[in-house]
Image: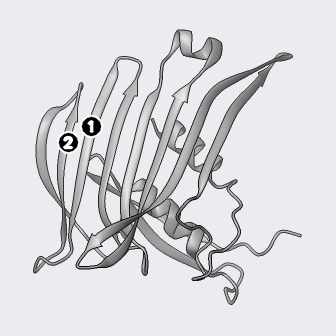
Amino acid sequence: MKRFFISFFTLLSAIGVAAAGDGLPFQAGERLSYSCQYRLSGIKGNIATCHASVDEADAGGGAGAFDIKVNLRTSGMFDTFFKVRDALSCRLTSDKLIPLSYVRETNEGDYHAHDEYSYMWGADKPYIKAKLSSTSNGTREVNIPLSDNTFDLLTLFFRLRNFNLSGADEGSSRMLSFVFDQKSSRVRMTYYGQET
């Protein structure tokens, strides 16, 4: 599973989009499709497709938001041996990219999971209200502590796309965390300089 998400972020990190008028590197109406390929001993083939979209939404109270959806699915011969049908979606405020909700529907071979996160920013101690269900752990509801730098996987990716590195010093880093299932994992983002 960890390898899958590393591959997923590697795939999405290749996205190059012109900046929107408000300075974001993406905008509502964005549609992206990818084909993932492998090469092994002279054999080349497609293993998966990924479709991503960004749409306008309402965050409530007249505030704007983005609905972001990503669908992953294996294809071709690979699909015969191991089927992947994953759908991720999140809603973020359009001004500060603050996460409001997240849904993950995972179908990978015999493993199935459905996670729903609701971000409870207005609580005395903010938390994520999570409804989690999987073939290996059953169904449960948990509250996950929330800090300003804790995100679900899609929100983390779109926040990373929006980081302004124009004044960053080489070697500077920033700690972030992401929530997957009910676990929070810390990641360090380090700026190594501009590629030439």
Residue closest to the eye, 17 or 148 = 17
SS label for mark 1: strand
Q: Which residue is mark 1?
A: 114
Q: Outermost residue, bottom direction?
A: 167
The quadrant of the picture occupied by the C terminus is bottom right
Tag 2: amino acid: Leu
Residue closest to the eye, 179 or 55 = 55
Residue at 41 percent of width and 18 percent of height: 109
Q: For this view, does 152 lie left or right of residue 80?
A: left
SS label for mark 2: strand
Residue at 68 percent of width and 34 percent of height: 35
- Contact (CB < 8 A) between labels 1 and 2? yes
Residue at 21 percent of width and 75 percent of height: 121
The quadrant of the picture occupied by the N terminus is top left
Q: Name the N-terminal-most of marks 1 and 2.
A: 1
Q: Is residue 74 above or below residue 32?
A: above
Q: Is residue 18 above or below residue 169?
A: above
Q: Which mark is residue 132?
A: 2
Which quadrant of the structure image shows residue 133?
top left
Q: Is residue 149 above or below residue 155?
A: below
Q: Which mark is residue 28?
A: none
Badge 2: few (under 14), some or many (20 or more) residues near its Cα, within 10 Å?
many
Q: For this view, does 129 lie left or right of residue 52?
A: left
Residue 66: percent from the left, percent from the top? 42, 65
Tag 1: amino acid: His
Mark 1 and mark 2: Cα distance apart in space: 6 Å
Badge 1: few (under 14), some or many (20 or more) residues near its Cα, within 10 Å?
some
Residue 70: percent from the left, percent from the top? 48, 45
Residue 27: percent from the left, percent from the top? 56, 68
Q: For this view, does 37 lie left or right of residue 103?
A: right
Residue closest to the eye, 13 or 21 = 21
Residue 169: percent from the left, percent from the top? 69, 86
